[in-house]
C-alpha cells in the first residue's frame, strides 16, 4: 500500500480508475455503469456534501436501498473524508434514532418513505436530512446534479476513520466499530491475493451493502482489481440464476447456497464457468458444503470475519477447502485460542475463545472506551467472543459462541435487545430469547415469556410492540409461555436447556 498517497483508500480503490470506461456495475436490467461514470457521480455527490457543510471526519448516516447511487455515496464519503455509516434498511425509526444520536451524524440520508419519521429525529439531533430512493431519485441526487464531475480529494491518512459500522452488544446497546482506511485497505488487498481476484472478474453481488460482507469484502475487492459486479438489489433465486452465466465469482451467506440448492435448475452446467463461490457471516453446514460439491463440482470457500475485524481466516484457494472449518488465518492476521477465564493461550486442539490481531482489526468502539477496553487488549488482540479450536492441520474451526448471539440469514441478532422489549410488556414478568435451528435462515428467534402471577400475556399485542421497536428480522418467529425459566445455582438463565427443549420447533418432522 502506498503510504505517501493523499487519501490511500480513495486513491487505491477509486481514484486509480479515473477515466476508465471499463464496466464497474452491471445492473439487473443489463444497463452498465462504467468506472468513469461512477466516479463522476461520486464526485458530484462529494461536491454536494461539501456544499451542505460536511467536513472530513463528519459522520454521514445512510439508510438507503441498494443502488448504484447508494454505492456512489460511499465513494463520495471516502473522497470527501466523511465517515460513512451505513444502516440496515430494515431498522425502525427508533433504531435509527439511536445510531444518529450516538454517532452525532451531521447528515442523515434516507428513503423518501422514511422522511416523515426521521425528520423530527434529525431536527432534534441537529443533523441535516436528505433523501435517496431506490430508483436513484431524491434530494441528495437533485443537489448533486449539475455539480462538477471532479472533486478535490480530501487528504486522509491510513489511520483516519473511514467508516462506522454498528454492531449490537450483549447488553443490548449497539456499539459503533471504528474502521480506519488501513483496516479496510489492508484486508481488501489480502483477499485479492488469497482469492486470486483480477480485473477479469465479474462478481455476482446479491448481498446488502450496509454490512462488511457486501460493502467491504465484495465491493472493495472488486474495486481493488478493477473488475465488474453484477449488482442485484437483493438475493432472489430466479434473478441470480438468470445472471449467473455472466459471472466468474459469487460471495454469499449460507442461506444463498441452501436456497440455490433447493432449486433443481442450479446444477453443474449452471455453475460450470464459475471460478469461485465464497461463504461467510454464519456457519455453513458441512452438509450444505458437501451437497453443493456433489451438485456443481465446486467446493465453497468458507471464510470467517467480523464487523470489528473484517476477514480473519479463509480456506485455501488452492488446496483442501475443508467443510466445517473456516480455514487458516489470513496473511498478516495472528489468531490464537485462549482460555476465556484467564486469557492464556491454549494448546492446539483445545477449545477456547478466538482472539485476533492484525492491521485488519478495528480502532475501537466510537466513544465507548470502556467497551473497547473490555474487548480489545492492550497488546492489540481482539477478543472475538467466538469459541473455536485449531485442528491438527492448522484449520480453524468455530465450535460455538461465548457471546449470546443469534445469526439469522447472516444477520446478527442480540437476544438482550429483544428481551428488553419483551420484559416491558404488560403481563410479562421476564423473558429469554433464544436462537433455534431453521432450515432457511440457519437460526431463528424464539421468545420465551414468563407471565406475572395470574396474568396471561397478550401475544398479539407483544408482537405488535416488537414490530414497532425492532427490525423485522429480529422479531420472534414464535412466542412460548413457561411458568419459569431454568436457572443455574448462580441464578443465570440456562439458555442451553431452552435451546435443547425447543430446538426442533422449525426443523422437527
Ligand atoms: C429478511 N427477513 C429475515 C431475514 N431477511 N428474517 C430473518 N432473518 C433474515 N436474515 C424477513 C423479511 O423481512 C420477511 O419478512 C421474511 O423475513 C422473509 O423474507 P425473505 O423474502 O425470505 O427474505 P429475503 O428478503 O429473501 O432475505 C433473506 C436473505 C437476506 C437473502 C438471507 O436476509 C440477506 O441478504 N442476508 C444477508 C445478510 C448479510 O449480508 N450479512 C452480512 C453481515 P415477512 O415475513 O414480514 O415477509 S455479517 C458480516 O458482514 C460479517 C463481517 C461477515 O463475516 O461477513
Ligand atoms: P458481525 O456482527 O456481522 O460482525 O458478525 C460476526 C460474527 O459472525 C462472528 O463473530 C461469528 O460469530 C459469525 N461468523 C462470521 N463468519 C462465520 C463463519 N464462516 N462461520 C461461523 N460464524 C461466522
Image (spheres, rainbow, N blue to C red):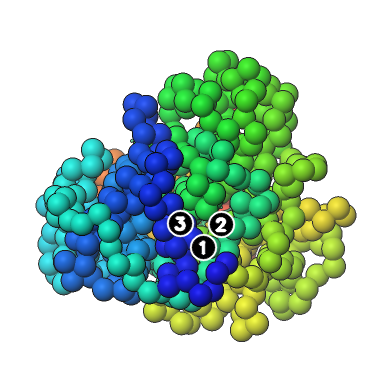
* Disc 3 versus disc 2: nearer the observer: 3
Label 3: how many residues lie within 10 Å, few (<14), some (14-19) or many (20+)? some
Front residue of 248 and 432: 248
The reply, left or right, for residue 349 in relation to residue 32 is right
Figure check: 7 above or below 401: below
Q: Which residue is mark 2?
A: 188
The residue that appears at 64% across and 70% down in the rendered structure is 358
User: Ligand 1 quadrant?
Assistant: top left
Q: CA distance from mark 1 to mark 2?
A: 6 Å
For label 1, count other residues whose C-alpha is less than 10 Å away and answer few (under 14), some (14-19) or many (20+): many
| Mark 3 or mark 1, earlier in chain | 3
The residue that mark 1 highlights is: 184
Picture coordinates of residue 188, whole percent (x, y): 56, 57
Write down the residue under mark 3.
Answer: 16
Mark number displayed over residue 314: none
Percent position (x, y) of residue 139? 14, 51
Query: What is the CA distance from the residue labelled 3 to the residue labelled 2?
Result: 15 Å
Say if 373 sits above or below 141 in the image: below
Q: Is residue 441 visible?
A: no
Q: Is residue 459 above or below residue 265?
A: below
State the SS at label 3: helix
Farthest-out residue, front: 19
Disc 1 on helix, strand or loop? helix
Q: Position of residue 234 (x, y in %)?
A: 40, 36
Residue 295 visible, this angle: yes
Amino acid at each position: 500500500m502506498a503510504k505517501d498517497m493523499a487519501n490511500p483508500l480513495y486513491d487505491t480503490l477509486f481514484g486509480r480508475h479515473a477515466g476508465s470506461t471499463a464496466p464497474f456495475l452491471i445492473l439487473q436490467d443489463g444497463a452498465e455503469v462504467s468506472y468513469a461514470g461512477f466516479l463522476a457521480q461520486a464526485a458530484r455527490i462529494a461536491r454536494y456534501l461539501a456544499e451542505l457543510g460536511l467536513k472530513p471526519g463528519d459522520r454521514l448516516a445512510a439508510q438507503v436501498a441498494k443502488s448504484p447511487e447508494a454505492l456512489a455515496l460511499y465513494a463520495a464519503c471516502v473522497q470527501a473524508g466523511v465517515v460513512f455509516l451505513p444502516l440496515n434498511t430494515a431498522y425502525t425509526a427508533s433504531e435509527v434514532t439511536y445510531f444518529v444520536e450516538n454517532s452525532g451524524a451531521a447528515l442523515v440520508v434516507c428513503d423518501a418513505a422514511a422522511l416523515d419519521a426521521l425528520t423530527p429525529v434529525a431536527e432534534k439531533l441537529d443533523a441535516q436530512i436528505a433523501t435517496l430512493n431506490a430508483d436513484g431519485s431524491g434530494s441528495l441526487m437533485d443537489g448533486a446534479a449539475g455539480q462538477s464531475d471532479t472533486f478535490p480529494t480530501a487528504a486522509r491518512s491510513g489511520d483516519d476513520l473511514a467508516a462506522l459500522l454498528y454492531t449490537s452488544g450483549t447488553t443490548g446497546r449497539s456499539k459503533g466499530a471504528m474502521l480506519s482506511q488501513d483496516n479496510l485497505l489492508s484486508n481488501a488487498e489480502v483477499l485479492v491475493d488469497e482469492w486470486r481476484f483480477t480485473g477479469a472478474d465479474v462478481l455476482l453481488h446479491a448481498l446488502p451493502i450496509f454490512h462488511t460482507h457486501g460493502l467491504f469484502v465484495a465491493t472493495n475487492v472488486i474495486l481493488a482489481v478493477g473488475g465488474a459486479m453484477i449488482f442485484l438489489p437483493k438475493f432472489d433465486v430466479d434473478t441470480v440464476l438468470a445472471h449467473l452465466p455472466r459471472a466468474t465469482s459469487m460471495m454469499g451467506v449460507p442461506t444463498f447456497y441452501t436456497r440455490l440448492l433447493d432449486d433443481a435448475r442450479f446444477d453443474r452446467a449452471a455453475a460450470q464457468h464459475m471460478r469461485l463461490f465464497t461463504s461467510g457471516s454464519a456457519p455453513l453446514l458441512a452438509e450444505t458444503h458437501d451437497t453443493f460439491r456433489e451438485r456443481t463440482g465446486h467446493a465453497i470457500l468458507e471464510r470467517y470475519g467480523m464487523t470489528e475485524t473484517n476477514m480473519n481466516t479463509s480456506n485455501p484457494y488452492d488446496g483442501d477447502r475443508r467443510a466445517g472449518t473456516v480455514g487458516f488465518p489470513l496473511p498478516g492476521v495472528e489468531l490464537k485460542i485462549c482460555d476465556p477465564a484467564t486469557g492464556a493461550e491454549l494448546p492446539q486442539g483445545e477449545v477456547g475463545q478466538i482472539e485476533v490481531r492484525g492491521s485488519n482489526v478495528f480502532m475501537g468502539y466510537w466513544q465507548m472506551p470502556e467497551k473497547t477496553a473490555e474487548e480489545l487488549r492492550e497488546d492489540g488482540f481482539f477478543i472475538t467472543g467466538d469459541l473455536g479450536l485449531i485442528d491438527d492441520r492448522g484449520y480453524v474451526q468455530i465450535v460455538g459462541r461465548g457471546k449470546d448471539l443469534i445469526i439469522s440469514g447472516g444477520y446478527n441478532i442480540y437476544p438482550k435487545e429483544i428481551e428488553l422489549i419483551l420484559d416491558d410488556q404488560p403481563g410479562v414478568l421476564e423473558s429469554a430469547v433464544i436462537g433455534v435451528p431453521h432450515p432457511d435462515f440457519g437460526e431463528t428467534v424464539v421468545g420465551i415469556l414468563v407471565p406475572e402471577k395470574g396474568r396471561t400475556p397478550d401475544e398479539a399485542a407483544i408482537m405488535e410492540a416488537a414490530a414497532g421497536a425492532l427490525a423485522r428480522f429480529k422479531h420472534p418467529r414464535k412466542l412460548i409461555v413457561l411458568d419459569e425459566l431454568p436457572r443455574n445455582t448462580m441464578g443465570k438463565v440456562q439458555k442451553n436447556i431452552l435451546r435443547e427443549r425447543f430446538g426442533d420447533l422449525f426443523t422437527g418432522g
